[in-house]
Image: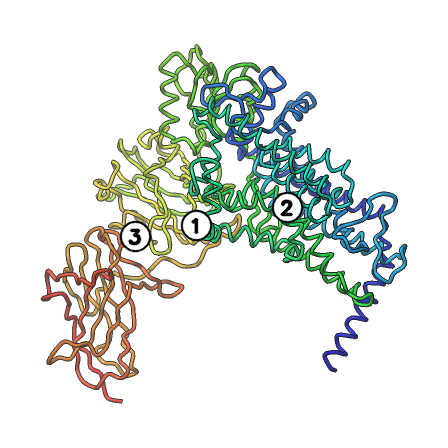
Amino acid sequence: MTNSSWLFRAGVVGERTVGRASARLRLSARTAYVLLVLLMAGYALLFTLISFRLHDSFITSADDLSNIDQAVWNSWHGDLLIRTTGTRQLPRYGEHLEPIWIALGPLFFVWNDVKILLLVQTLALAAGALPAFWLGRAMLAPGRRAVVGSVHRGFAPQLPGSPDSSLEARTAANLAGLVLAAVYLLLPFLHRANIAEVHAAPFAVAPLLFAFWYASQGQDARVWPFALLVLLVKEEQALLVAMVGLWIAVRQRRPRAGLALTGLSLAWLLVAVFGIINQFAEVRTGTTQSVFFGRYTAFGETPAAIVVGFLTHPALVRDLFLTPERLRLLGELVASTGGVLLFGLDAAVLMLPLLVLNLASDYVAQAAGLQHYAAPLVPGLIAGAAVGGRRLLTGVGSKARPVATTALLLWMLASAAATALQAGFLPVSRGFWLPAVTPHDRMLDRFIAQIPPGAALSASRQLHPHVAHRRYVTRFPTIGAATWALVDVTGDRHVHPADVKMAVEGLLASGWGVVDAADGYLLLHEGAAATALPEAFFSFGRAQEDPDVPLDLVFARPSGEALLRVLGYSLARDFWGRVSVRYVLEPLAALPPGTTLRPLLLDPLGRPVADTAGAPLLFPLWYPLDRWRPGFLYAVETPPRDVRGQPFRPALGVAVGEGTAELNARWGHAGPVLVGLDGNTLVTLGEWQPAGARFVPTGRDWHRFDLRRAPEHPLAVRLGESVALRGWDGPTRTTDGQLPIRLVWQALAVIPRDLTVFVHLVPLEGLPIPVAQADHVPTVPTAAGLQLYPTTAWQPGELVLDEFMLDVRGVPPGRYRLLVGLYDPNSGARLLLTGGGEGRAVPVGEVFVPGR
């Protein structure tokens, strides 16, 4: 069958299939609207539940949610958009001008809970699916104009060559509308905004889409209410309204209507930024301009200088815009519609001002389109997709049009779904993960119930959104005028744990007392009598569950006295993908004062990802190990650390005292050796690969090999001050052109730089010119094969088995000497031998290469 006949038959089959499907569907406008409402309701229900879960599990914080929540609540209790900043009451409009929050304030009289803001934000984003649906139907409307039609009285777009009222035309148009609405709801930019607590910008998305839709229909009287609503959302959103005005003036050739809208928008922008925000910014920060201009100092220090710098330094703009996070944002914008918006750039240009502001910012979350920053780009994206889709179908003949329409809609839907799977926050998305609401989280209500409603309060960052409906509330450990303090010592990683402990002790020593305490929570009040922390407060360090990875690992004194047993550990990830390890420990005897745990996360090469030097372990900080009682089980969780999706190995050591001077005081562990480092006092406990919300064992036991057997050719040669060569294994005769060699190294001290091993095969007589050589980074055997193990990862006292092959093919037959050494690859300098050899190479033995 020829290609042309195959394509013809495929087209006929496709047309008949689509026609039969359309006839069976009979998708009327009424049915389409019902399906649209179901899509919108599904989105709203899902993201309402997600946002509520994030709030209930303490993912929301004072930085965003109660930053806005308190200002909104205060607006209807006598203080217009005032919130507590530090210890002062300052207006929010010193940062942003967002009058929409005033309008939303009365919602608290319906439900006096911050969750109503999360709910309304979700509903506002879901509402954008309606104009997206209209724009999708208009893709198939007749006529030359980009998007033209009527949404009233049974809108029925026509297909070329079809009757005005054909069932196929109505079904195709309604399907197109549902597809574009689904594409809209699948966009990861909406999902990110929905889970990033509450911000004003997402409230601009739906009104902008409505404004563009009515602008495309020439219904200016309906454009203006939505445009004005956008202007009330946030100051920079005026740039998007201005672009709608320019689109009306240029693309629709209605300059009077368009330029009036653009002029009003830009005037409002100037008044908002330079007349209001800058004035109150001086009150808030002492500066004469908005602090957010500081994100563009790469181009200049003042607004005028930033604009001039941006326009006159194209190389700087190019280099900045081509960074990975910015290219990723551009790629997501294009991929989310399958590239269709590229055919509608005259409409997608609506997003240009805010896209440029995002890409030019030095704030990574903004530049990468994370959190809420890319949500206002969505109207331009959807408009571009609608216009681009229409343009792609223009000129397609009546016979091929059903197939082309079906292919286009399926392509857009599949592309949006793929982008959502990769970068969105649906339950099936790659990065989806929701924290559980724990008994600890639910205990918060017990403490909130004891705080008087109007009391001036200081609260931990993650508790702040739960108690912000009051005039004055600071972030602990800032006290100011507060007379109550609500603290969760287990949750706030933005304040150093030692600072939290010092602040609590300072309050208890200055006339404050404990009202209630349990599981890491503290409710303090000025004038309360009790000043000692009750035993219930320390329950957050008592092991309540069995570890996921059971162990029977014992740390003992050098004399052999067993002091501490490790019963196992569990791995956990937080909302941001960081990893923590929760160890279950049992003291076997009274532990000496100054006993400390040293947990680490190591990468596959043995280098620390992080240790606890800058962030002490919480429970031992409040309840030192010398207070632990034998026979009790304790749980110690490490601070969360970002492993960047790479394999990692938990490692644990125990020491008396702190700091590098005490490393030799760590106890060796008894029982089977897993992987012993640092004189067998630091133990690695398996290797794990993050996989979404789970952790998968890699099966690699880090260079687990038997060094109890002495090498075949023992040596005692010291190279420099930090490395010794203890011997080597390998044949002294080769028959297949390959010479397998094992070198046994020992680290005598910390090695400050990565060294390269050299192995030279040289003649017994004459100049030592290599006839074969193998320079390499030390390579250790594992269950999964050989892995690099650079010298900077070696621990003092550790024995390292270095395996490699020396290729002797092409070497003339005869006897040769094998020379081994180490050198610095940056300078080429070899380490000087200090025993067992002369110069800078160790003659380890002789090798015979036979003839072939």
**Residue 676 circle label:** 3
- Read off the residue under disc 1: 316
Left or right: 711 with respect to 337? left
Q: Residue furthest bottom?
A: 852
Q: Quadrant of residue 338?
A: bottom right
Gap between marks 3 and 1 measured at Cα: 50 Å
The residue lying at 20 percent from left, 82 percent from top is 848
State whether residue 581 appears in this view.
no
Q: Quadrant of residue 504?
A: top left
Secondary structure under the numbered disc 3 in the rendered image: strand
Q: Nearer the viewer, residue 689 or 216?
A: 216
The residue lying at 84 percent from left, 56 percent from top is 158
Tell me if label 3 and label 1 are in contact, CB under 8 Å.
no
- Read off the residue under disc 2: 350
Indicate which disc, 2 or 1, sits on the residue closer to the N terminus. Answer: 1
Amino acid type assigned to the residue bearing label 2 in the image: Leu
Amino acid type assigned to the residue bearing label 3 in the image: Gly
Q: Nearer the viewer, residue 204 or 556?
A: 204
